[in-house]
Image (cartoon, rainbow, N blue to C red):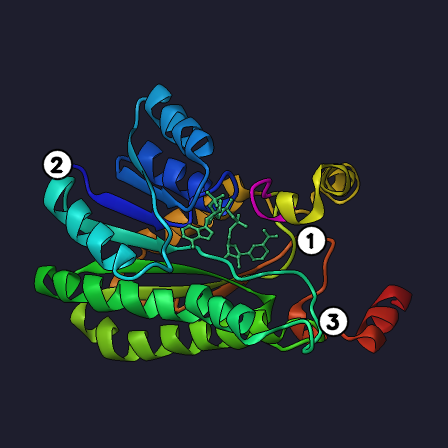
Amino acid sequence: MKPVCLVIGAGAGIGGTVGAKFAAEGYHAVLCRRSDEEGLQKLVGAIEGAGGEATGFLMNATEDNAIEERVAQVEAEIGPIDTAIYNLGAQIGNRSLAETPPGTFELGWQLGCFGLYRLARCLFPKMVERGKGTLLVTSSTAAMRGNAGQHSHAASFGGRRMLCQSLNAEFAPQGIHVAHIIVDGSVDAPDTLGKLLGPERFQQLRDTQGAKDGLLLPEKIAETYYHLAQQHRSVWTHELDVRAHTDIPWFNSSAIARSVASEI
Ligand SMILES: NC(=O)c1ccc[n+]([C@@H]2O[C@H](COP(=O)([O-])OP(=O)(O)OC[C@H]3O[C@@H](n4cnc5c(N)ncnc54)[C@H](OP(=O)(O)O)[C@@H]3O)[C@@H](O)[C@H]2O)c1
């Protein structure tokens, strides 16, 4: 039986591409996404067409028990989950505080933080019993600093980062590897950034930034994820950041730092 890689939030960007990488390396990829049945079948079909194993589920991860029921079903019907990828984003574009009503803020928290707690709470007891498991958590610049218009996103992702650290403290000694991966820049992700920007602006971004490798490529991110999942426990990475060579890091990205950097 192949080890299972469960992806919560699998579009054509990071989630689906990481699933495809794990499938190519001998895992059974279980891809879960909210609404796009055609997109889901395309991802599953591409993995199977390449000789890999994959199963796709449509699910809204914020619904009561959706994550818990999916984990139970996958464990019972497909096999033990060796690696889980928590890839749900909570970016809703820049919104002032006045444009961030309670429901919007709370949804960000559900996607950014609470869903991760729910996944760990139902999956980790099984991994502890097996003495091993990996949870790779996609994150973003918003986990590292707040910003105007990012109230919901930054608050929920700050929580995501701290939850990863807390989970690591409790579960690393029990054999579970949790890695928080800060994706510090725009990704060539048609199902998320592409939809947020609209086709015209997304194509412009690909033609400008993408043409000089200024967009993070999901295929390259997937190589990092696979490497993380294979690390020996004497050298586990708990946090890392990835960004394009054209960008400057989140901790150096104020307007002053940008202008200084451009003069060097
Ligand atoms: N894209 C970027 O520029 C960027 C930059 C920095 C960090 N990140 C991080 O990267 C991760 C996302 O990766 P990606 O942007 O490449 O996206 P992706 O893997 O291409 O797609 C993510 C998928 O998540 C699914 N999803 C959203 N809400 C869901 C829900 N409630 N339940 C189940 N599935 C849900 C969507 O499915 P449907 O399409 O079917 O609705 C979407 O296709 C996030 O953690 C984000 O913070 C992205």
Q: Residue at x 22, y 59 (%)?
A: 68
- Image location (x, y in percent) of residue 253: 74, 71
User: Closer to the N terminus: mark 2 or mark 1?
Assistant: 2
* Observer-nearest of 155 and 79: 155
Q: Residue at x 36, y 65 (%)?
A: 115
- Image location (x, y in percent) of residue 261: 83, 68
* Observer-nearest of 195 and 237: 195
Q: Which residue is mark 1?
A: 245
- Image location (x, y in percent) of residue 6: 29, 48
Pointer 2 local density, CA inside 10 Å: few below 14, some 14–19, many at least 20: few
Element type at marker 1? loop
The CA span between labels 1 and 3 is: 14 Å
Proximity of marks 3 and 2: CB atoms separated by less than 8 Å: no
Magenta span contains residue 141: no
Point out the stretch of residues depicted in magenta.
Answer: 189-193
**Quarter of the rendering containing residue 118:** bottom left
Q: Which mark is residue 1?
A: 2
Name the residue type under label 2: Met
Name the residue type under label 1: His
User: Closer to the N terminus: mark 1 or mark 3?
Assistant: 1
The CA span between labels 3 and 2 is: 47 Å
Element type at marker 2? loop
Proximity of marks 1 and 3: CB atoms separated by less than 8 Å: no
Element type at marker 3? loop
Q: Is residue 13 visible?
A: yes
Q: Is residue 214 visible?
A: no
Q: Which residue is mark 3?
A: 253
Residue 123 position (above or below residue 18): below
- Image location (x, y in percent) of residue 125: 14, 66
